[in-house]
Image (cartoon, coloured by chain):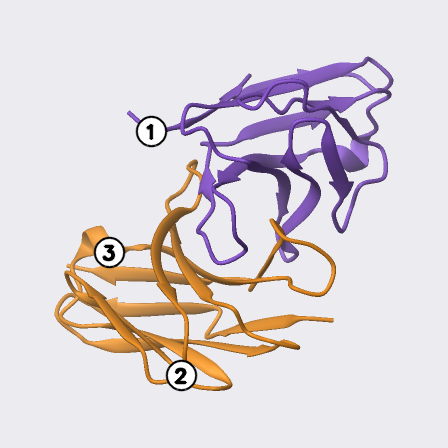
Chain colours: A purple, B orange
Amino acid sequence: EAQVTQNPRYLITVTGKKLTVTCSQNMNHEYMSWYRQDPGLGLRQIYYSMNVEVTDKGDVPEGYKVSRKEKRNFPLILESPSPNQTSLYFCASSSTGSDQPQHFGDGTRLSIL
Amino acid sequence: EDQVTQSPEALRLQEGESSSLNCSYTVSGLRGLFWYRQDPGKGPEFLFTLYSAGEEKEKERLKATLTKKESFLHITAPKPEDSATYLCAVPDLLTSYGKLTFGQGTILTVHP
């Protein structure tokens, strides 16, 4: 089954404790993205990757890091999480071309205390 | 900067009561408009891509249409299982590929 898998689905942690949210897709897609979804602000892109070792900032990249060492994986790293990063995070992937629909994971709900 | 605006923010319908959701956009060059459905606790699920003005696509009780400035998602004789948040999005052409600009969404509730 074609899917985007995120882990963990839920995480409560404390300010400053480094964390990584993993994302994996099995569709051999070139593009992968991370979004955060906040009430009243909608979905906003954090980072995206056009292929292995190629990443770029989205609209809200501050406080986040990403890496793309393998085509299927695109982890999101919070080096020093802060409470304003409490949010619902989604990973997405798509094949080549801006007109190709993105396929989303089921989300990771992060709470930073 | 691309902007996508959806209306209404929320819509409550009785089962069988048809209606439409609106997505208006201002972009430098449209190369597709996407509609997604999002259920609580889930990621957005792709519904349709529309590429050019005048295009229409259908799936069960849903029909999406596109003009030069807006898109409509028509819901015919909705059922309670159609309750969800509906999102539209456009790809960003100026800054990069792989980036979507989303509207705020319309929360649809269909009562039996």
Q: Which mark is residue B92?
A: none
Mark 3 residue crowding within 10 angstroms, few (<14) / some (14–19) / many (20+): some
Circles 1, 3 touching at the beta carbon (< 8 Å): no
Question: Which residue occupies 48% across, 86% down?
Answer: B68
Q: Name the amino acid, label 1.
A: Ala
Task: Indicate left or right for A28 with B82 as reference.
Answer: right
User: In the rendering, at what x and y percent does residue A13 appear?
Assistant: 72, 16
The chain holding disc 2 is B
Q: Amino acid at mark 3?
A: Asp
Q: Residue at x 17, y 75 (%)?
A: B17
- Alpha carbons under labels 1 and 3: distance apart: 23 Å
Q: Is residue A16 visible?
A: yes
- The quarter of the rendered structure image containing the C terminus of chain B is bottom left
User: Which residue position is annotated with label 3?
Assistant: B82
Residue B20, image x, y percentages:
31, 77
Separation of marks 2 and 1 at Cα, in angstroms: 31 Å
Numbered disc 1: secondary structure: loop
- Mark 1 lies on residue: A2
Against A28, residue A13 (above or below) is above
- Residue tagged by mark 2? B53
Instruction: Give the structural element (helix, strand or loop) at label 3.
Output: helix
Q: Is residue B3 above or below residue A19?
A: below
Quadrant (top left, top right, bottom left, bottom right) of the N terminus of chain B: bottom right
Question: Quadrant location of residue A35?
Answer: top right
Q: Quadrant of residue A30?
A: top right
What amino acid type should be assigned to the residue bearing mark 2? Ala
